[in-house]
Image: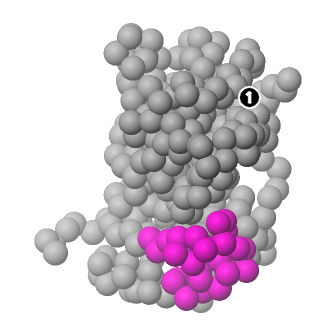
Amino acid sequence: MPQREKKSIKLLCFESSCDDTSVAVVEGEIRDEIPSLVSLSIQNQNDLHSKYGGIVPELASRAHLENLIPCLKKVLHESRYKLEDFDAFAATGLPGLTGSLLIGHTAAKLLSMLYSKPFLSCHHLQGHLMSIFLEHRPSFPFLALVVSGGHTSLFLVRSFDDFEEIGVTLDDAAGEAFDKGAKLLGLGFPGGAYLEKLALGGDVNRYPFPQVTTEDLNFSFSGIKSEMVRCVNREKEKLNRSDAAAGYQNCIIDHIVEKIKIALKKYHLNRVAVVGGVACNQLLKQRIKDLQTKGVIESFFAPKPEFCTDNAAMIGVLAFRKYQNQNFSSLDSDVGYTKRPKLKRLQRG
Ligand code: KG4
Ligand code: ZN
């Protein structure tokens, strides 16, 4: 590995909110807006949960325990830092599965205690927002869509540290809808990527899926999902799975893109970023690029797949900014859902 110039602030960061165990080392100077990513390791648990068709929380926590040390050893080796070299330790504190969150959070807290260094408890959704800055530097303000297995929200991002949730799903998250649709079609878990593959070449018009049309900025995927249940039960062995996948995916993406268009207009924005696991979806990215081609937006940003799904690099960016602002967390801080941040203009109905 080539020699690199070491920076003065070095952070060790953990992400274990759901079923991906991830550890990252980031470093930067106090004047830097965003740190550099030095090393990242991610261990997913897809094989473990796929036979159950969904995440089993108890198994997820146990797997985090097994995966954490190998992930940690890998980033220490790659970064050539020792535990005592770090200036602070960070971990995702919420939201997520309690048993899973506790693994990374407790590891970071213990290291902070052991080396008398600050502890930084981070919000998973803010982390996803920060994942954009690992590779891109969009001008502010811009619209950010966080679209993952657990969350679907629109944010108005005014600066690195000033963002507002302007829309949220009222039921399922988009990734959850992909996963449930995939399960109904007998695909593996997590189902988003499988469903996308099955949909390739499928006829989007063969099975009608309902268009969700409301003028507010909130999402709803339960009607689309119910239609998939009806379709599978009605068609039985006659079902063309590829056409069903294509129609279903198209309907989910249509709904998301409609909400993006409403938000752009309402807030006079012309830049869009998409983050979270569903940001890996090619059709979603293509449909937003089409907005750019048509001149509706001037630019569009999405992280590479490794930074879309859960990872500790995004937590590193957030932790670095918290460190700069001396926004340290107490060693007594707990994991779990607390009041959601900056949820000022949530619109319902
Ligand atoms: O961000 P993430 O790793 O976890 C959460 O914070 O929830 O996102 C995982 C979700 C899963 O629901 C998965 O099916 C979905 O992202 N996903 C996709 C694709 N790749 C991953 N959904 C649609 N198309 C994809 N290509
Ligand atoms: Zn996530």
Q: Which residue is mark 1?
A: 218
Q: Assess whether residue 61 is covered by the magenta stretch.
A: yes
Q: Is residue 326 left or right of residue 293?
A: right
Q: Secondary structure at mark 1?
A: loop
Q: Of residues 131 and 63, which is closer to you in this image?
A: 63
Is residue 12 visible to the viewer in this orientation of the structure? no
Q: Where the N terminus falls, by quadrant?
A: bottom left
Within 10 Å of the Cα at label 1, are there few (<14), some (14-19), or many (20+) other Cα atoms?
many
- Three-letter code for the amino acid on which mark 1 is drawn: Asn
**340 lies above or below 44:** above
What is the x, y in percent for residue 296?
44, 12
Q: Where the C terminus falls, by quadrant?
A: top right
> Is the stretch drawn in magenta largely helix, strand or loop?
helix
Residue at 70% across, 73% down: 56
Image quadrant of residue 170?
top right
**66 lies above or below 131:** below
Residue at 44% across, 71% down: 42
Residue at 47% across, 17% down: 270
Residue lying at the far front of the rendered structure: 238
Image quadrant of residue 282?
top left
Residue lying at the far right of the rendered structure: 349
Q: Is residue 244 left or right of residue 106?
A: left
**48 lies above or below 176:** below
What is the x, y in percent for residue 146?
58, 41
Q: Of residues 190 and 137, which is closer to you in this image?
A: 190
First to last magenta residue range: 42-68
